[in-house]
Image: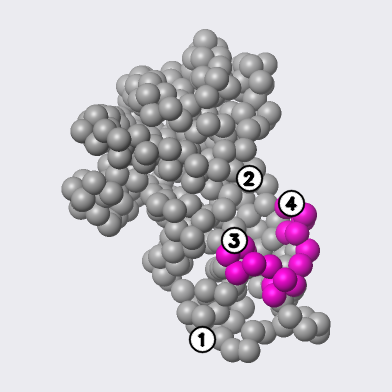
């Protein structure tokens, strides 16, 4: 048997603006993960079991653009495997789907690592990340690349999209990824609205806003970029009160982008009222998750307030 695992992820700052070349910060969430087990099979074909999404099928019965099928087909094309081996692939995950925790990218990364190891086609982290990004493009249109990056490296990262932004102005900074230092560990409470929120839709809607008034939205994205850079500085210096206020500012700009929702705003308000240092939506928005920065002794109280305000479940995670 060959096994591989990949964590979830949460974006701290910069979602949506990151697509347009501004920086974003994100961290892995190791409390949730995707696991892939691969064994050789006596039966013809490649059989895939993914009980969390009620999938039990042979590869050839799936459309070629199915997220799991596309990983297998593209990896075997890349590695020049022919004919395809007879395999049983089991995929399990504790990462909620379409909630901003990177479930799709985690499946891609874990499956890529398990498959490449099983067929003796070694891949570096850089190669896994590049391959996962190509898969993300198939399913999200113009993804930022942050999900696959954080999940592949399983480290806190400062990310700037390398390729030119849609505006043609290019990415800020040098581009690519950097791990960033955490001056002191801090606690994040993640609250899940329970509302499925496909990233592609909110990314597409923000793009329509940008196309209709590029000057306005470039300015908004610039403000988000300034906040993300300030947040990195606050994290490196261990200034949590500053970080909380930056979260609040970022959430206001995401509301302006129309990617928040009444459910997200209710959870953000509940967290702040319960003593969080700051709170904002995280990810694509319109549902999915929000995050609250908390002092350790307030984490449980904030988590309870989120449940009372309608969160379906919460995760308390430490960033270190």
Name the residue carrying label 3.
Answer: 67
Name the residue carrying label 2.
Answer: 97
As measured in the structure, the alpha-carbon distance from the residue carrying label 2 to the one carrying label 4 is 9 Å
Q: Secondary structure at mark 2?
A: loop
Residue 22, image quadrant: top left
51 relative to 185 in the view: left or right:
right
Q: Are marks 2 and 4 in contact (CB under 8 Å)?
A: yes
Q: Earlier in the sequence, mark 2 or mark 4?
A: 4
Q: Position of residue 247 (x, y in %)?
A: 39, 25
Name the residue carrying label 4.
Answer: 52
Residue 56, image quadrant: bottom right
Residue name at image x 18 percent, y 48 percent: 169
Q: Earlier in the sequence, mark 4 or mark 3?
A: 4
Rendered-image quadrant of the N terminus: bottom right
Q: Secondary structure at mark 4?
A: helix
Q: Residue furthest front?
A: 212
Residue interval drawn in magenta:
50-68
Q: Residue furthest right?
A: 43
Mark 1 residue crowding within 10 angstroms, few (<14) / some (14–19) / many (20+): few
Say if the magenta span includes residue 54.
yes
Q: Earlier in the sequence, mark 3 or mark 2?
A: 3
2, above or below 144, in the image: below
8 relative to 169 in the view: left or right:
right
As measured in the structure, the alpha-carbon distance from the residue carrying label 1 to the one carrying label 2 is 31 Å
């Amino acid at each position: 048997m060959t096994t591989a695992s990949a964590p979830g992820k949460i974006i701290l700052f910069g979602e949506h603006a990151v697509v347009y070349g501004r920086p974003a910060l994100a961290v892995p969430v190791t409390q949730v993960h995707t696991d892939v087990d691969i064994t050789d099979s006596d039966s013809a074909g490649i059989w895939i079991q993914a009980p969390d999404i009620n999938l039990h099928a042979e590869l050839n019965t799936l459309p070629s653009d199915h997220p799991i099928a596309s990983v297998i087909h593209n990896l075997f094309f890349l590695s020049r495997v022919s004919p395809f081996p007879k395999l049983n692939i089991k995929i399990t995950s504790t990462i909620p789907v379409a909630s901003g925790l990177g479930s799709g990218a985690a499946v891609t990364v874990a499956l890529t690592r398990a498959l490449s190891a099983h067929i003796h086609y070694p891949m570096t982290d850089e190669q896994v990340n590049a391959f996962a990004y190509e898969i993300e493009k198939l399913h999200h249109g113009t993804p930022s690349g942050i999900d696959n990056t954080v999940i592949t490296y399983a480290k806190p990262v400062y990310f700037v999209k390398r390729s030119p932004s849609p505006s043609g102005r290019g990415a800020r900074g040098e581009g690519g990824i950097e791990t960033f230092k955490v001056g002191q560990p801090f606690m994040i409470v993640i609250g899940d609205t329970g509302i499925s929120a496909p990233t592609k839709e909110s990314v597409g809607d923000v793009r329509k806003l940008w196309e209709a008034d590029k000057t306005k939205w470039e300015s908004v994205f610039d403000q988000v970029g300034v906040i993300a850079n300030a947040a990195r500085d606050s994290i490196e210096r261990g200034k949590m009160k500053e970080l909380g206020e930056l979260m609040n500012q970022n959430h206001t700009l995401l509301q302006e982008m129309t990617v928040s929702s009444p459910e997200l705003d209710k959870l953000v308000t509940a967290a702040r009222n319960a003593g969080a240092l700051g709170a904002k939506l995280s990810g694509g928005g319109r549902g999915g998750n929000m995050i609250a920065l908390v002092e350790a002794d307030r984490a449980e109280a904030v988590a309870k307030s989120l449940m009372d305000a309608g969160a379906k479940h919460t995760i308390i995670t430490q960033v270190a």
